[in-house]
Amino acid sequence: MTIDPNLPQPDAGVPGPGVDAPLFAAHLEEGLDNALRTFTAAGTIVVALDFDGALAPIVLDPTTSAMLPLSAQAVADLTTLPGVEVVLVSGREAGDLVALAGLPAGTRVIGSHGAQWGRAVDSPDGGTVLDADPVDLTTEQAELRARLLRETEELAATVEGAWVQAKPAAVVLHTRPAAPADGERLTRAVLDGPAAHDGVHVVVGKEVVEMAVLEVTKGDALVQLRSAVGAEAVLYAGDDTTDEDAFAVLAEPDVSIKVGDGDTAAAYRVADPEELSAVLVRLVELRRATSVTPS
């Protein structure tokens, strides 16, 4: 076979036989691909990923969220590579996250924006379940959480489609299924009402208001995780305003990736979860190709 030098040439770092580099690299701008090369050459690395809007496309019913197949395979592959610590960092309750994501056993999970820490472990039915540290609240915090739940449920009952989620250390209002104008009105009522109580830490996301009785952020979680595993570099990818706390604690050779549009402190951006799949596949290929042995 004659190779035309004017045509794109194969790149051994690109997955799949016969895939020309530009066909794959079209999903990754050059600066990001170079950053991934540097990142994967480090000894011990953390690959930290948000779930909704990053690994899984946003859907109207969050109980039906699912990782894109290519991302799921890449996550599974990354967990098998030496010196790679994979962790899902999400605003979701950690047990729900494990059930939805179908994570390989051993995968770290940080739920509720950093309030819950655990791992996916094998379950008797062949799947995985959460093995997590308990979330300890003081009596005052537990009483405040109960008050938040009661008052938020009363307000949400006036808007069709809105619903309220109770987490171990927080109460969350979801308005995505509601009519936009009704959702905005309800969000304002909650922010002016239960969210305004002393001791409540509020995070406003995309059609979500989370009211926590513990002050934790995804950024705090990444700092703690880096120290715990002795990581030389951390990659974090997420799509929401709550992910900005994580981006803010990263610096080269770390890699921060915003998924989707909107202002961000992240160094790099991909358009959607499909493009993040390309990033994860690239990570697997680059890490497999490196000869670095973690110290």
Image (cartoon, grey):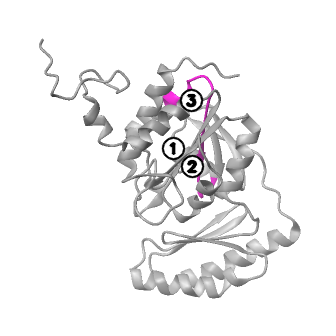
Q: Please tell me in which quadrant of the rendered image residue 281 appears.
A: top left
Give residue 195's mark. none
In the image, taking residue 33 as reference, residue 153 lies left or right, namely right
Residue position for label 2: 97
Q: Identify which residue is drawn at 16% across, 28% down.
A: 7
Q: Quadrant of the C terminus?
A: top right
Task: Inspect the image, locate mark 1, and give the three-letter code of the amino acid beneath it.
Answer: Ala
Mark 1 to mark 2 CA distance (whole Å): 6 Å
Residue 88 among those drawn in magenta: yes
Residue position for label 1: 101
Task: Inspect the image, locate mark 3, and give the three-letter code of the amino acid beneath it.
Answer: Thr
Q: Identify which residue is drawn at 49% across, 69% down.
A: 206
Q: Which contiguous range is marked in magenta?
A: 76-93
Q: Is residue 195 above or below residue 14?
A: below
Mark 3 to mark 1 CA distance (whole Å): 14 Å
Crowd tier of the residue under label 2, counting other residues whose Cα lies within 10 Å: few below 14, some 14–19, many 20 or above: many
Crowd tier of the residue under label 3, counting other residues whose Cα lies within 10 Å: few below 14, some 14–19, many 20 or above: many
